[in-house]
Amino acid sequence: MKIKSLVVSAILIAVGIIIPLFSPIRILIEPASFTLASHVAIFIGMFISPSVGVAVALGTTFGFFLSTPLVVALRAFSHVIFVLIGGILLKKNPKLIDNVMFVIGISIIHALAEVVVVSFFYFGGNSSGFVTSVLGLVGLGTFVHSIVDYYLAYFVAKRLGAAGYEKLFQ
């Protein structure tokens, strides 16, 4: 990883840790939690390269391990999966960045990974509660949250490119 990539990764990690800690726009319905823009740094990292995306996902996971319950930190760790897949696909075909089907696909992978993580903590109880809590709140909620944050990140990345920082994304 080049020095520029390390510096950008570090800045994105800091942003990725700060947003969930201080954002006033947060929804918490156990076992789900959604903070607007909490994935923006991770998505921007994914837009830059697979390695930057994974570094940001791992760095923000470390921050979550220090400040949140285990289930939340492990949900953050699951981001490595969709970021790696998305980063590799974008590296092979950069035009996917504004493809709606790509966004939906990445959001499905994101939601499935978080459902798997949360399932380990909530499995075995009331099956209707499991369906509502894990599949409904975490699965569907993460899917929608992922799409919203993806487009926020896309907007920020486009603005950075227009402001002269397009070399970040090459």
Image: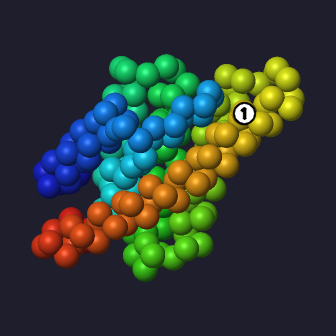
| Image side of residue 137 versus residue 86, left or right | right
Residue 61, given in percent of the width and then of the height, sits at 40, 33
| Foreground residue among 59 and 124 | 124
* Residue located at (73% from left, 41% from top): 135
Above or below, 164 relative to 152:
below
Q: Residue at x 43, y 80 (%)?
A: 95
Residue at left offset 53%, top offset 51%: 145
| Residue at the front extreme, as displayed | 24
Q: Position of residue 151 (x, y in %)?
A: 43, 64
Residue on which disc 1 sits:
133
Q: Quadrant of residue 50?
A: bottom left
Residue 103 horizontal side relative to residue 44, left or right:
right
Q: Is residue 87 visible?
A: no
Query: From this viewpoint, which residue is outermost toward the bottom?
Result: 95
Location of residue 115 in the rendering, given as x and y in whole percent from the top left corner: 66, 39
The C terminus, quarter of image: bottom left
In the image, is residue 70 above or below residue 77?
above
SS state under label 1: helix
